[in-house]
Image (cartoon, rainbow, N blue to C red):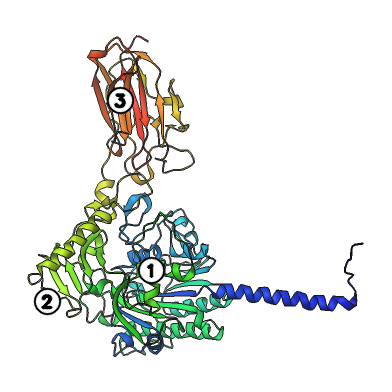
Amino acid sequence: MTNRLRLTRKNAIPLQILGCTILALLLHTSIAVANDKPNIIVIFTDDQGYHDLGCFGSQTIKTPHLDQMAAEGLRLTSFYAQPVCGVSRAALMTGCYPIRVAEPDNVKHLHTVPHPQEWTMAEMLKEAGYATALIGKWHLCQRDRKASTGFRAATMPNAQGFDYFYGTPQFNGLTTFVNQSRFRSPILRNEEVVVPQVQDWDAITGDYTREAIDWIEKHHRQPFFLYLAHNMPHIPVGASKNFKNKSKNGPYGDTIEEIDWSCGQIFAKLKSLGLDENTLVVFTSDNGPWIEKQIPRNHSGTADPLRGWKMSAWDGGSRVPCIVRWPGKISPGRESDEVLTTMDLLPTFAAFAKAKTPKELILDGFDASEFLLGKTDNSPRDEYFYYCGCLLTGVRVGEWKLVLPREKNPPGTGWWGRMIEAVVKTQLFNLDKDPGESNDIARQHPDVVQRLMQRIQHARQELGDIDRSGRGARFFDEGPRRLEATRRSIKNRKVVYDNAKPVGNYRFTFEKEDWQGWKVVEGSLPDALTDRDTLPNFKSQPFNKQGDWFLFTGNRKTQTRGDDSQVGIIESPTFLLKGPKVSFLIGGGSGNSTYVALYDSDGKQLRKASGSNGPTMRRVVWNMSDSIGKRVKLRIVDQSAGGWGHVTFDDFSCQTDD
């Protein structure tokens, strides 16, 4: 007989107690697993100078909470971001130099726009079980006038790993005061515009702080990643009534002191929730202070004792204050002048969060977890390359900084250029002794110059420079790399059909969507016959086809950008060649794996032609006098899955009796 437990009043109560006990144990186990991964908060200010914290030397800006954070954690005095907003945020989110990061249409923007296929810090932590939020400034998006937000959804935070977003898609302004410009920034909550136009910025730091505390409250029972990216102290500055006109450093100081208050609120919330010892907090800035004639000095900061400012190639452009705090893990009161960067945070967070990074993904960041925890005094990074956009301007290795010659306002740097000073010869500085980069000692240390120049050459080959793409640079779209700052000349170049006169009575024009007997004999190219007008990244250069329809081996109806990964062979009908000439248009790849060839009936290749690595099809005319009377056929061969790995073909003509 099978014994079965009978549920009666007598045994029901113990079962309820047992159930509660099991539930409590499961909950305890869940929390223990969650506590195995630290919460991570990155507080990122905008245009804050190296000097502009009490613990970094300011005598006019009061920052008691951040000074206490430094006393309880690690102060990094040789920490680098990038020289301007967008590229700095790209380096933080991708763990890479922005010149390596892929961008839509292969255009290197002055403010980096990571390609939707790029992999971000937020995506990494989300995959590791973290709740993720961005509260504040994004500035890694592409404009799209047709979108309800004004920006391409695939480049916005919710598509790049953040569960929650509240803030500005780009910057808050370009002038000292809001009313000096027609520009007004919106504020979004996820994909909804909640404030169409911000008229003043006095409330923004308080708003972000309340949003951050509320979000932490809602998600504190699981590991969380909060990226709190303040708009302040970027102009136009603003501060709430509790902070306005209070700082000895004027309006700029007001914003920093309110950010300091905000940090205090965050720390208080962590303590009240019992999360303080399980939360890693990093405080830093995106770049140096914006110092320019039209900006009053009390509306921007200082990088003392460094030389330079935002957008410059000197250390004041990219070297920023940084404090790291994790009670019980990072020893209090530590200070280090070891070189570390925002790029190193992604692999470091991966180590702490036990997160996986794609094996094939090349990062420029290093895992600094042991360094931060004090297990070693040495940073894993021994070099930092200085880039202004795509222009390589120097390298730091240890205490040495090599500065490359450059002209004032270098070509290809766009609006950055006005902030970049000329350097007439290669210079060398010892940053330990000369942080202001005022004493060039290149002549005294030719061996150091030579050693650092070898690093420069490696960077040019791997990452690239203003005049070249690096072998390690990522590109997900068709076409070569292009610089946004030089796009105007490209846009104005028009390419049209050449109106060539046919050389005979036999033609392939493919009009009315007619394959005219052509067949795909190898691979799968069902959409090769197309009437598309452009490639997405070459909209100003429409295909110079003779009509509407032509052959394009990279065409795929389901995507606008084409697909170079497709390979195959398309073959024409056989025809009798009776005239001395053959004429056609060919474009696409120029390599040996993408071409059009003419074969005789025995399969012998008679002629071969390729494109020129661009959307423009070139006119090819073959002299076929030696082959008159032969039966021949054409083959379009595409065996390349790389960049420009396709063939375009149109407007064939020859003389035949067929």
Residue of label 2: 439
Q: What amino acid is found at the position of numbered circle 3 in the picture?
A: Phe
- Depth check, front residue: 648 or 5: 5
Q: Residue 367: give its label.
A: 1
Specify whether 389 is left or right of 161: left
Mark found first going from the N terminus, 2 or 3: 2
Q: Residue 258: give its label.
A: none
Residue 439: horizontal and vertical position, in percent?
11, 76
- Depth check, front residue: 332 or 515: 332
Query: Helix or strand or loop: what does disc 3 sit on?
Result: strand
Residue beneath the point at 18% across and 78% down: 436
Of badges 1 and 3, nearer the viewer stands 1
- Depth check, front residue: 209 or 299: 209
- Figure quadrant of residue 97: bottom left
Q: Is residue 616 visible?
A: yes
Residue of label 3: 584
Residue 447: horizontal and vertical position, in percent?
12, 67
**Residue furthest front in the image:** 1
Residue 354: horizontal and vertical position, in percent?
49, 67
Do the residues bearing badges 1 and 3 touch, measured as CB atoms within 8 Å?
no
Q: Measured along the vertical axis of the image, is residue 146 above or below residue 75?
A: above
Residue beneath the point at 29% across and 90% down: 59
Q: What amino acid is found at the position of numbered circle 1 in the picture?
A: Asp
Specify whether 94 is left or right of 211: left
- Figure quadrant of residue 81: bottom left
Q: What amino acid is found at the position of numbered circle 2 in the picture?
A: Asn
Quarter placement of the N terminus: bottom right
Could you give the CA–CA distance between mark 1 and mark 3, rounded to whole angstroms?
55 Å
Q: Residues within 10 Å of mark 2 (few under 14, many from 20)?
A: some
- Depth check, front residue: 430 or 624: 430
